[in-house]
Image: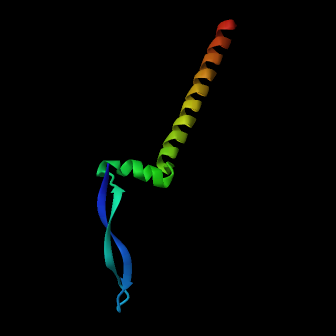
Amino acid sequence: MASFVQVCASWITNTDGTASCSSWTWTQAYLLPPEAEGQIDLLIQGGFSPNLFGVGFTGTLSLFAIGFGIGVVVSQLRKLRIR
């Protein structure tokens, strides 16, 4: 739902170098609630999180190592049974 928001239409530079608004206008805008902060950060940053990448990569390598270890143990148990 759109709301009307007061925004600065033109800026003027003061003698001390600071800027101030010389005229205000009302414009229609979509205001986002504070709960949308996480989604906005995801949109702006592109959705890549180095921390989550590290967790996923470590998890993948851990599962590979566990699977490989179980495979080696099962293979050795089968070889022991045959003899």
69 vs 45, left or right, is right
Q: Quadrant of the C terminus?
A: top right
Along the line of sight, the residue nearer the viewer: 26 or 37: 26
Instruction: Count the labels in the image.
Output: 0
Residue at image point 65% right, 12% down: 78
Relative height, residue 61 to residue 45 (above, below): above
Along the line of sight, the residue nearer the viewer: 37 or 27: 27
Q: Residue 63, position in %: x, y?
A: 54, 31
Residue ranking furthest to the right: 83
83 vs 59, left or right, is right
Relative height, residue 51 to residue 24 (above, below): above
Along the line of sight, the residue nearer the viewer: 81 or 31: 31
30 vs 59, left or right, is left
**Which image quadrant for residue 57?**
top right
Residue at image point 60% right, 20% down: 73
Residue ranking furthest to the top: 82
Coloration mode: rainbow
Residue at image point 48% right, 54% down: 45
Q: Residue 16, position in %: x, y?
A: 35, 91
**Which image quadrant for residue 31?**
bottom left
Q: Residue 79, position in %: x, y?
A: 68, 13
